[in-house]
Amino acid sequence: MTDPGYSVRCREYAEAIWELEEAGIPVLQARIAGWLGVSPASVSEMVRRMTAEGLVNVSDEVRLTEEGRHLAAVVVRRHRLAERFLSEVLKLPWAKVHQEAEVWETMISDDGEKAMWEAMDDPMTCPHGNPIPGAGYQPPRMKPLAEMERGETLALERISEELELDADMMRFLDENDIRPDSRIRLVQKDPYGGITVEVENRQVGISVFASERLFVAMDELTA
């Protein structure tokens, strides 16, 4: 749980590398640049610095060292705890907690983290269903909405961090009640890969990009 004393930028990059790995995306410098919305030159400079500090190794991909993984786990854990706290305790709108938690994660101390765990009775995931490192979360079998069969009804389990980066997408999901534990029924797939689902008795169109990054638990729900 101890907070390693690294710069804010090191924390941001370690978090990004963790999240790219978690999403199954090759951790190339160009991917890091796109994830963080920074220039390739900035990534190259920061990766050199993190390599010198023993946080990453670079070969075909950028990989966290043991120390880098510890740093990333602390940052991701505090970000997702903050999201949960902002949503459940402070009642901040669900679609806004990701951006606010980016500020909070840099200010949470070891004692603050411990108090948050206790106040929320040891949560396993953030409000979007992403696992909190160290919480012991055991995920169910999952698949993206894009792989659902027509007429299948499943519970949404997780919204990828990649979608959380898009404030407009989060508002769209919030407005349409597409959140973890929602019952999602696949109505149809269009020829271009998008899908139509039914949520709360209304139909919603979802793009290819989003349908590949929204994950449902694979145990089919009964009516």
Image (cartoon, helix red, strand yellow):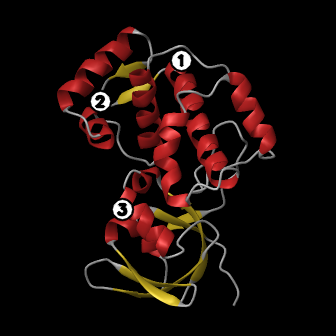
Mark 3 lies on a secondary structure that is helix
Which residue is at the front of the view, 185 or 109?
A: 109
Depicted 174 relative to depicted 190: above or below: above
Residue to which mark 1 is pinned: 67
Sort mark 2 into few (<14), some (14-19) or many (20+) by Cα contacts within 10 Å. few
Quarter placement of the C terminus: bottom right
| Residue 159 x, y percent position in the rendering | 51, 59
Between discs 2 and 3, the one toward the N terminus: 2
Depicted 117 relative to depicted 196: above or below: above
Residue to which mark 2 is pinned: 60
Which residue is at the front of the view, 42 or 67?
A: 42
Drawn side of residue 195 relative to residue 42, left or right: right
Label 3, label 1: how many angstroms apart (C-alpha)?
35 Å
**Residue 168 - label:** 3
Which residue is at the front of the view, 53 or 164?
A: 164
Q: State yes or no: discs 2 and 3 in contact (Cβ < 8 Å).
A: no
Mark 2 lies on a secondary structure that is loop
Label 2, label 3: how many angstroms apart (C-alpha)?
33 Å
Residue at (55, 33) in percent of width and height: 105
Amino acid type at image mark 1: Glu
Q: Nearer the viewer, mark 1 or mark 2?
A: 1
Residue at (66, 19) in percent of width and height: 2
| Residue 28 x, y percent position in the rendering | 29, 35
Depicted 149 relative to depicted 115: above or below: below
Between discs 1 and 2, the one toward the N terminus: 2
Residue at (33, 78) in percent of width and height: 194
Which residue is at the front of the view, 208 or 140?
A: 208
Depicted 217 relative to depicted 28: above or below: below
Amino acid type at image mark 2: Asp
Drawn side of residue 165 relative to residue 149, left or right: left
Quarter of the image for residue 200 reads: bottom right
Label 1, label 2: how many angstroms apart (C-alpha)?
20 Å
